[in-house]
Image: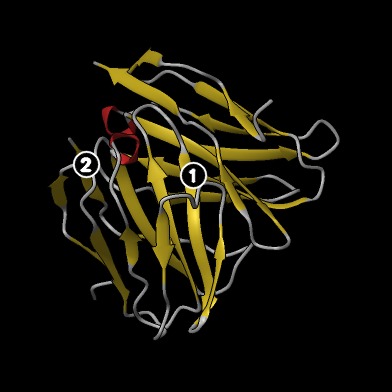
Amino acid sequence: RKEVEQDPGPFNVPEGATVAFNCTYSNSASQSFFWYRQDCRKEPKLLMSVYSSGNEDGRFTAQLNRASQYISLLIRDSKLSDSATYLCVVNTNAGKSTFGDGTTLTVKP
Amino acid sequence: NAGVTQTPKFRILKIGQSMTLQCAQDMNHNYMYWYRQDPGMGLKLIYYSVGAGITDKGEVPNGYNVSRSTTEDFPLRLELAAPSQTSVYFCASSYLTGNTEAFFGQGTRLTVV
């Protein structure tokens, strides 16, 4: 079993749709959690950190469920520019970062 | 502001050749990382460094070597290139580890033929 597993996707949604991605992790010692966005043939860039209390940044909401060991990313009112691959990243306290394989989102007009 | 700079951007190697991928950051970050990303997959950690003179293996270190003589530079050496090393290589840095954002270079696309 992979340490970090993401919805395989791809997700194809129309503009304006709401879409949610899930990510599960196996290491209960994991301390910090992130969502990165990666555009085609580009480097990953931080989208948002994920806090225990959940956090929101505009149309994006991230949540963490430590008991069930999963994190989620919700995108509301999808835009064409949201088309990308979303990577779930889980860090241990020792600083080891484990990336999920990514979920590809395509938003269509 | 340059951030993390990787060179070259593209390279084709023949089997058995060697090369060094360069990585430099100007943010005075202590932590630096090398990842590889195969098509349709996430990033796998090759090596990382917590400061000048200190390096450690990641998940997939075989066939690679690193050094960290300065805070700014973290080159990755490929010895005896093999087709299995065809991948996109990303260098990254962060101020701390764990809870802080990692900044990535633009990547090096390497093909071994």
Q: Hey, which quadrant is residue B93 in on the image? A: bottom left
Q: Which of B59 and A98 is in front in this view?
A: B59
Would you say residue A52 is visible in this rendering? yes
Residue at 81%, 50% (x, y): give it: A29
Residue at 64%, 30% (x, y): give it: A2
Chain at tag 2? B
Residue A41 location (% of width, % of height) = 24, 39
Q: Is residue A109 above or below residue A67?
A: above
Residue A18 location (% of width, % of height) = 48, 21
Q: Hey, which quadrant is residue A4 in on the image? A: top right
Nearest to viewer (mark 1 / mark 2): 2
Q: Which of B48 and B64 is in front in this view?
A: B64
As drawn, the label of residue B15 is 2
Residue A19 location (% of width, % of height) = 49, 21
Question: Which amino acid is tagged 2?
Answer: Ile
Label 1, secondary structure: give it: strand
